[in-house]
């Protein structure tokens, strides 16, 4: 065989510095070399495996005299298929995927493979194909997979258009699909799998202004929420939370909305709090918003770098007995402050609590368009404005990004200093009041 092949070794470049892509390509190259060996065996008079040879097309010899295999495969002409690129991207060990991010990319992957075609060569995808992708998506109804489980996206889009459906995917969600698809193409460029990103810069106009996407709760909604049986007397903290009764349980469902109202935390920031995150700093009780866990668990996540902060506990929460609740949790040996809120499939506890809160507001008569738990943050921010709290202090309390954090428009002085004293933050948050909302029935002396 050496005499026929004309060499002692066969070397092939995998054409990538990505281990994941290299492993995938290695199988095809190994197979081509096996075919080369089978051909050499046949030429030497030995028995050759015809199954291996069946898919090979023999071409001219290498420059050094050895035979080569001219594969008539799509990969040889146009690169990996879209499915192969997506698989390599999702398996790339250099990417730090959170469960929620992975799920979002998997959802986009499903849509992209169904619309483009999973065996479509990555190099054949053009700008026009990406615009066609947009046209299909913009005609899809929300929950399309549940409404039409057996139809392809193109068939669903045609049916939805024929039926005149208006419950379509929002521009924000469509742009999220495009952003993630473009991210995969950008990765493929870095891996030298394609020469250009056909989806770069593509987006659809979103007529809904950012400030209109979520609204603060109205005073009437807040009154309805905190006048519900859960806060005035219910049957129990389980299925009877919406039925009037003699019990007034003070657990996660009771405290989480109140912490959102008076401290302005994001829902997941509240749900993932450890009992150890309630700390006394400079003689002031604070909520430590951090991804660090003293028990070593790595189950907490923050949205941005500015999310990590200390938020003093509002005096109203103290009057309602919040510290007594924390002490009870610690005495019970609970690690999580709200341990009854389980981890969601996406790795966020908020995804477990949020659907319940939606049902709660409906039963309390507080449901309204463009409002959800996040509306508490809007209410909190408005209360800071009403109290004329300095903007920089307000941003610190809410964990909102400061100018210059990502846009680069801030002053150089923004990066100097160590931040505000806890006493200053406590003074500011104590100014947050809701004069039209009477919550005296929640105070422990009532």
Image (tube, rainbow, N blue to C red):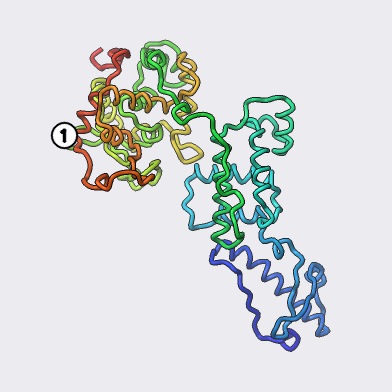
Quadrant position of residue 223: top left
Image-based side of 63 in relation to 312, left or right: right
Q: Is residue 323 above or below residue 246?
A: below
Which of the image's four quarters has the N terminus?
bottom right
Picture coordinates of residue 302 (x, y %)? 38, 42
Looking at this view, name the residue that lies furthest to the left: 283
Element assignment for label 1: loop
Q: Please state the total of marks drawn on the protein image.
A: 1
Q: Nearer the viewer, residue 131 or 302?
A: 131
Which of the image's four quarters has the C terminus?
top left
Q: Nearer the viewer, residue 404 or 327?
A: 404
Quadrant position of residue 340: top left
Characterize the local packing of mark 1: few (<14), some (14-19) or many (20 or more) Cα atoms within 10 angstroms.
Answer: few
Q: Nearer the viewer, residue 361 or 204?
A: 204
Residue 323 appears in the figure = no
Looking at this view, name the residue that lies furthest to the bottom: 3
Q: Residue at x 47, y 13 (%)?
A: 365
Q: Residue at x 71, y 81 (%)?
A: 62
Residue 107 appears in the figure = yes
Image-based side of 384 in relation to 215, left or right: left
Residue at mark 1:
283
Quadrant position of residue 217: top left
Q: Is residue 307 above or below residue 263?
A: below
Picture coordinates of residue 15 (x, y %)? 60, 69
Q: Residue at x 31, y 23 (%)?
A: 383
Q: Residue at x 54, y 40 (%)?
A: 176
Image-based side of 176 in relation to 154, left or right: left
Picture coordinates of residue 331 (x, y %)? 27, 32
């Amino acid at each position: 065989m050496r005499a026929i092949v004309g060499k002692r070794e066969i070397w092939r470049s995998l054409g990538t510095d990505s281990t994941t892509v290299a492993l995938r390509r290695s199988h095809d190259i190994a197979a081509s070399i096996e075919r080369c060996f089978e051909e050499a065996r046949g030429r030497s008079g030995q028995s050759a495996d015809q199954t291996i040879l069946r898919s090979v097309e023999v071409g001219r010899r290498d420059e050094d005299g050895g035979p080569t295999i001219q594969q008539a495969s799509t990969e040889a002409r146009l690169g990996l298929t879209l499915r192969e690129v997506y698989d390599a991207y999702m398996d790339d060990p250099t990417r730090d995927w959170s469960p929620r991010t992975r799920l979002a990319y998997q959802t986009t992957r499903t849509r992209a493979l169904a619309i483009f075609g999973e065996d479509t060569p990555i190099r054949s995808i053009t700008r026009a194909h990406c615009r066609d992708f947009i046209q299909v998506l913009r005609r899809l109804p929300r929950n399309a997979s549940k409404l039409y489980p057996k139809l392809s996206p193109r068939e669903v889009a045609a049916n939805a258009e024929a039926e005149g459906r208006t419950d379509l995917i929002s521009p924000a969600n469509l742009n999220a699909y495009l952003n993630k698809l473009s991210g995969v193409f950008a990765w493929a460029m870095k891996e030298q799998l394609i020469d250009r990103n056909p989806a770069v810069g593509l987006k659809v106009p979103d007529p809904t202004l950012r400030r209109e996407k979520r609204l603060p709760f109205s005073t009437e909604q807040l009154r309805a929420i905190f006048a519900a049986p859960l806060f005035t007397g219910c049957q129990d903290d389980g299925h009877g939370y919406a039925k009037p009764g003699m019990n007034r349980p003070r657990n996660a469902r009771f405290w989480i909305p109140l912490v959102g109202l008076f401290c302005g935390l994001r829902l997941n920031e509240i749900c993932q709090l450890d009992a150890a995150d309630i700390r006394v700093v400079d003689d002031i009780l604070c909520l430590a918003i951090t991804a660090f866990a003293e028990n070593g668990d790595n189950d907490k996540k923050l949205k941005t770098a500015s999310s990590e902060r200390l938020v003093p506990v509002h005096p109203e929460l103290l009057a309602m007995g919040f510290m007594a609740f924390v002490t009870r949790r610690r005495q019970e040996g609970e690690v999580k402050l709200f341990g009854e809120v389980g981890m969601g499939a996406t790795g966020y506890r908020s995804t477990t609590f949020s659907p319940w809160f939606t049902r709660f507001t409906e039963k309390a008569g507080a449901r309204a368009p463009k409002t959800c738990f996040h509306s508490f943050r809007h209410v909190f921010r408005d209360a800071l404005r009403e109290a004329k709290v300095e903007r920089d202090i307000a941003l610190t309390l809410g964990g909102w990004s400061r100018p210059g954090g990502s846009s680069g428009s801030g002053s150089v002085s923004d990066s100097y200093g160590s931040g505000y004293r806890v006493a200053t933050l406590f003074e500011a948050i104590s100014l947050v009041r809701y004069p039209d909302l009477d919550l005296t029935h929640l105070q422990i002396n009532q």
